[in-house]
Amino acid sequence: MSTETLFRRIADYASRADPYPLYAELREHGAVRQDDGSYLVGTYDEIAALLHDPRISSDRRRRTVPDALGPGQDDVPPAFIGLDDPEHDRLRRLAMRPFGPPHSPGRVDALRGEITRIAGELADGFADGKRIDVVDDFAYPLPVTVICRLLGVPSEDEPRFRTWSDSIVAGFDATPDEDPEQRLRSATEARRAMALYLGELAESRRGHPTGDMLSALVNDEGPEGSLNPIELMTTSVLLLIAGHETTVNLITNGVLTLLRHPDALARLRDDPALMPQAVEELLRYEPPVQMLPQRTPLADIEVSGVTIPQGAPLILVLASGNRDPLRFAEPDRFDITRPDNQHLGFGSGIHSCFGAPLARLETQIALTTLLPRLGDLRLVEDPPPYRTNQVLRGPRHLLVEAAG
């Protein structure tokens, strides 16, 4: 089969349960041009170098040809994840002030008790022997509750965000033979609705700080000033979406992987102190973010002997790099004690995942909470039904029931 159709084959829903053979095909070539004019890169060293290359832009507006994800959302300003320095650096630093070091070093760790309590309450539903959907009954409600509490969203408004989030995330889909305009229009409308809600909620706390992140973003002014109303809305949407969508997949992929690897599950049950290492291996082995589709060369660059022209869509397939045998010994083996595990699960460089500390903490607590129960459960369906999205990959449902 032609490598020029590789992205279409990866995007095909039939590949969602196991895209790794296609990633192996990609690594054989290093970098390949697709029939839509985009370029795929799937080898670890090349991806790592490009993530640190100042000639690579994260701003889709720098593209000179259409990309695999369809037209951009020009009427909705991008959040800082889709901008380059110096603007990216300014907005990221403003967002970091109330979230983590050096200004708020205890913000994430202070959530440990609340996360443990929420996870325990959700896990209690696993005890009565009924069939459980790990996604709907545990992996989704845990991080969405945590990020809403962190931002200061009232609990009665939390259900709104699932509909909005589903539409926004669907905007990343690049399903062949589907009209992208309707999908992107729905994503834009959902993003706008969420932005207006969060912007109004934040403004209601201006001058009346309540201790949450939205309150801090409108009331705490650092050396760089403060976010303007549009920046506040786009940043808040990014924090909410990034704060739960990837973690849902990471937790769900973790449960699925442990149930498929009973030896690893038994070892973790005997020694829960290995959980931080196990989560790092999950980020390598089954990363929730499979690829970064929004990269653009600002000049002609050469990757693995292939010249990628200025302005062409560049897709960095992180999950392929994580299985590169030139970087990881036995890369297709799940090893919870793997040494030197410098995976690409959270990206790298200036755009490395902003919420990585929170995602790690939530997943460690979630899986540790479930450990006593997982040994008595079996998968109802394997492979489970996956979400259509090929960028943020994870099961849409994960049904489990008592073994025996």
Image: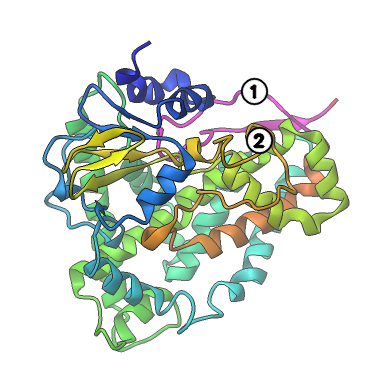
The residue located at (18%, 48%) in the rendering is 299
Residue 52, image x, y percentages:
37, 56
As for residue 224 lying within the magenta part, the answer is no
Q: Secondary structure at mark 2?
A: helix
Give coordinates of residue 200: x percent, y percent: 25, 70
Residue drawn 68% across and 64% down? Answer: 117
Residue 253 picture location, percent across and down: 60, 39
Q: Which residue is mark 1?
A: 382
Q: Earlier in the sequence, mark 2 or mark 1?
A: 2
Q: Is residue 386 magenta?
A: yes
Q: Amino acid at mark 2?
A: Leu
Which residue is at 56% across, 36% downward? 323
Badge 1 crowding class, 10 Å Cα cut-off, few under 14, some 14 to 19, many 20 or more, is few
Q: Which residue is mark 2?
A: 256
Q: Which residues are magenta?
A: 377-403
Of the pair 325 and 383, the residue shown nearer to us: 325
Quadrant that contains the N terminus: top left
Q: Amino acid at mark 1?
A: Asp
Residue 79 lies, in percent from the top left, at 26, 60
Q: Residue at x 70, y 51 (%)?
A: 339
